[in-house]
Structures are given as structure tokens and as C-alpha cells.
């Protein structure tokens, strides 16, 4: 059974929570590992319930899945414990001994001008400041926090052993390729690399162990905070087209632009995408709302997808058609990517 990773192809908020929620529900992986930190909000909607998750893996819906937080991730105790209750995953969620712990002083540090937080439009969650402390080798790690003592495990060892046993493992990347500290629109970026390789490193698995890199795009591009956004639409245009969104963590209105092929090609390259998931197809083709079969999609929607597939040269295996995780066209079996059976 494979190792698969889900990453964002644009500037975050592509709908990774929805895709991960669906994959968790249908594939029932043995393990799912969350990377990154609490600046990244992932939304999972299932059966009229909405979870806005900042640290618990969005793959949580199957009770069979063991949920882990990566060594390279950063948690906040209050956020972690609150979400464990909200999702009811106590007893199957564990934290790596080297996961970093954000404290109130990190949030304070980010308010100083030195952090350029205003210019960049930081989410002000203390993540960047905690990364600074990590580099200065003075960050508190999970293994040294009493409240976490019952949750501490060796995530790298667990993941590698699960793969040796042939279990399915998912890694949940966060944010998006162009917010990467290395490959993004510097300095308008976040405080970590956000490409697939970086998340493998956060977990502790080598590149040869990955079977599937699922890059998630939305049918249009959004960005919160500062930095370039090609072909940006005015607020009015975005609203008229039904593309206005509010950010999960900060509640800010997201900036909007049409789907960007150039960025998508580059994201495919930077992540070695093997599959693409596209979300919010229903935003472009309203008649396709919550359609779940390829053959039932409108002709225009199918043409749009096929054209994209031809340009990007990567199979578009998962197509989101609504908020609920089950509003999904899953073409994996049909395209030869099935591993359930
Ligand atoms: P920070 O990492 O919170 O300091 O934010 C740096 C930049 O990345 C800002 O423009 C944020 O709006 C953006 N950003 C950080 N995390 C996310 C995310 O999960 N989704 C979308 N944008 C994000
Ligand atoms: Mg988000």
C-alpha cells in the first residue's frame, strides 16, 4: 500500500481540507500525518457538519485512521486540545516528540515591525516567530511539555514501519506552493517550504517512499494577505462571479483571480505531481453542483477538465463539486489509480 501526499498548488485555500476529508472517509488510511501549523485552516464539511481544523488532520473521519502530528509541525496546546474534543479523536491522535510548541510570546513577537507582518499580511498566529526560535534552538518541543506526555510518539518510525507493513499512509501538506519560503513570491511567503518534499522532511520519510503526489488546485485562484496576484479581479467582479471567500483562520476576505495555467504548470513541476485534485468546479459550472459521476458532468465542465489535463499532462483524478466531502467525482479507479479493491 502506498504513501500519498496532498499539497496545495496555489496560495493555500485550494480545498485541501475537503480533498483530505474525502480521502480519509473513502480510503480509510492506517495513518494520516498533519504537517505545518495553525496558520493553515482546513475546512471539512460532512453531513451538515462543518469542522474548521488548524492542527488535527482533515483525514480524521474514519475511526480506523491513526492521526499524527509531524516532527516539523508546530502546535499550540489550546488549539490542539480544543480540536481533539471537537473531532472526538482522543485516543487516536498522537504528536511527535520533536513537534514544536507555539507560545503566547510568539504571537507578541510577530507584532513587532521586524516581522513585516503587516506588509505580508501574516495570520499573526506566532508561527513565523516560533520558527525563528526553532532556528535559534530555543523552541520548546512536545516531549518537554507535561500536558502532552500521553500523546508523544515517534512519528517517523511509525510511518516508516506502517509502510513496511503495507499500510496506506497519507501526509497532509498545508498552505500552497507559492507561499513557500523557497519557491514562493518572497518576501510575501510563509515561514516554511510548502512543497511536497518539505512535508516529507517534516514527517521523516525519504523521497523514494512516495507513490502519489496529489496537488490540489481550486477552479480559480485566491490569496490572503500581500504579494503579487496575476489578473486579480476587483471585489465587485469576484462577487458577481460568486467567487468571494472569507479566510478560515483570520476571517479576512480573500483576493481572487481566474485559474492560472502558468502557476499550475510550475506547481506540477515543483511537487512532481502524479495526480491533480480540482475543487469548486461548481463555482465555474453551476449546473454541476454536487455531481458525483464523470458521465453526469456537463459537457462544458468535462471539456474544461480535459483541456487542463492535456496542458498539465497529469491525470485529474478528483473533482470537487460542492462543499460536502461526498460532492466529489472520483476518477481514480477509471484512470488506473485505484488502490482500494
Ligand atoms: P504567516 O505564515 O501566517 O506569517 O503568513 C504569511 C503569508 O502567508 C500571509 O500572506 C498569509 O495570509 C499567508 N498564509 C499563511 N497561511 C496560510 C494559509 O493556510 N492559507 C492561505 N494563506 C496563508
Ligand atoms: Mg485554508
Image (cartoon, rainbow, N blue to C red):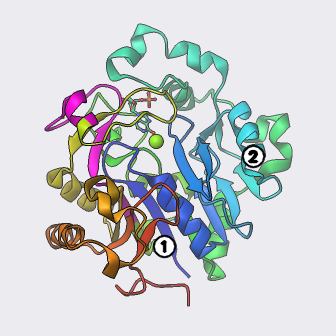
Residue nearest the observer in this picture, 295 or 61: 295
Residue to which mark 1 is pinned: 209
Mark nearer the viewer, 2 or 1: 2
Q: Decide whether residue 8 is among the magenta residues.
A: no
Tag 1 or tag 2, which sits nearer the N-term? Answer: 2
- Asked if residue 34 can be seen in this view, the reply is no
Q: Decide whether residue 226 is among the magenta residues.
A: yes
With 177 as the anchor, is 80 left or right in this view? right
With 141 as the anchor, is 289 left or right in this view? left
Q: Quadrant of the N terminus?
A: bottom right
Residue nearest the observer in this picture, 203 or 304: 304
Kind of element beneath mark 1: helix
Question: Residue at coordinates 78% horizontally, 52% vertically from top-left?
Answer: 88
In x, y percent, where is residue 113? 40, 8
With 150 as the anchor, is 182 left or right in this view? left
The residue most toward the bottom is 341
Question: Residue at coordinates 62% horizontally, 59% vertically from top-left?
Answer: 47
- Asked if residue 214 can be seen in this view, the reply is yes
The region drawn magenta spans: 214-239
Residue to which mark 2 is pinned: 84
Total labels: the figure holds 2
Q: Quadrant of residue 317?
A: bottom left
Kind of element beneath mark 2: helix
Amino acid at each position: 500500500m502506498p504513501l500519498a501526499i496532498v499539497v496545495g498548488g496555489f496560495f493555500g485555500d485550494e480545498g485541501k481540507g475537503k480533498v483530505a476529508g474525502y480521502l480519509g472517509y473513502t480510503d480509510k488510511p492506517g495513518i494520516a500525518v498533519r504537517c505545518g501549523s495553525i496558520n493553515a485552516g482546513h475546512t471539512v464539511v460532512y453531513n451538515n457538519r462543518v469542522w474548521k481544523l488548524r492542527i488535527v488532520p482533515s483525514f480524521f473521519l474514519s475511526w480506523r485512521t491513526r492521526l499524527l502530528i509531524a516532527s516539523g509541525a508546530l502546535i499550540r496546546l489550546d488549539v490542539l486540545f480544543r480540536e481533539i474534543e471537537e473531532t472526538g479523536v482522543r485516543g487516536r491522535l498522537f504528536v511527535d516528540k520533536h513537534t514544536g510548541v507555539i507560545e503566547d510570546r510568539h504571537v507578541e513577537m510577530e507584532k513587532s515591525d521586524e516581522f513585516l507582518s503587516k506588509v505580508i499580511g501574516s495570520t499573526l498566529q506566532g508561527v513565523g516567530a516560533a520558527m525563528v526560535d526553532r532556528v535559534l534552538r530555543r523552541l520548546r518541543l512536545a516531549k518537554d511539555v507535561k500536558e502532552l506526555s500521553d500523546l508523544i510518539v515517534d512519528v517517523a518510525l511509525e510511518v516508516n514501519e506502517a509502510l513496511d507493513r503495507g499500510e496506506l499512509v497519507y501526509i497532509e501538506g498545508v498552505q500552497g506552493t507559492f507561499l513557500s519560503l523557497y519557491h514562493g513570491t518572497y518576501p510575501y511567503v510563509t515561514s516554511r517550504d510548502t512543497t511536497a518534499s518539505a512535508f516529507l522532511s517534516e514527517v521523516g520519510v525519504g523521497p523514494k517512499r512516495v507513490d502519489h503526489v496529489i496537488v490540489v488546485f481550486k477552479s480559480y485562484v485566491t490569496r490572503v494577505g500581500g504579494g503579487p496576484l496575476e489578473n486579480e479581479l476587483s471585489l465587485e467582479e469576484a462577487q458577481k462571479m460568486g467567487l468571494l471567500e472569507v479566510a478560515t483562520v483570520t476571517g479576512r476576505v480573500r483576493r481572487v483571480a481566474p485559474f492560472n495555467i502558468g502557476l499550475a504548470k510550475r506547481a506540477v513541476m515543483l511537487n512532481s505531481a502524479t495526480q491533480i485534485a480540482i475543487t469548486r468546479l461548481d463555482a465555474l459550472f453551476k449546473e454541476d453542483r454536487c455531481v458525483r459521476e464523470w458521465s453526469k458532468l456537463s459537457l462544458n465542465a468535462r471539456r474544461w477538465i480535459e483541456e487542463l489535463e492535456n496542458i498539465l499532462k497529469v491525470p485529474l483524478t478528483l473533482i470537487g463539486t460542492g462543499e460536502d466531502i461526498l460532492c466529489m467525482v472520483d476518477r481514480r479507479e477509471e484512470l488506473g489509480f485505484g488502490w482500494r479493491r
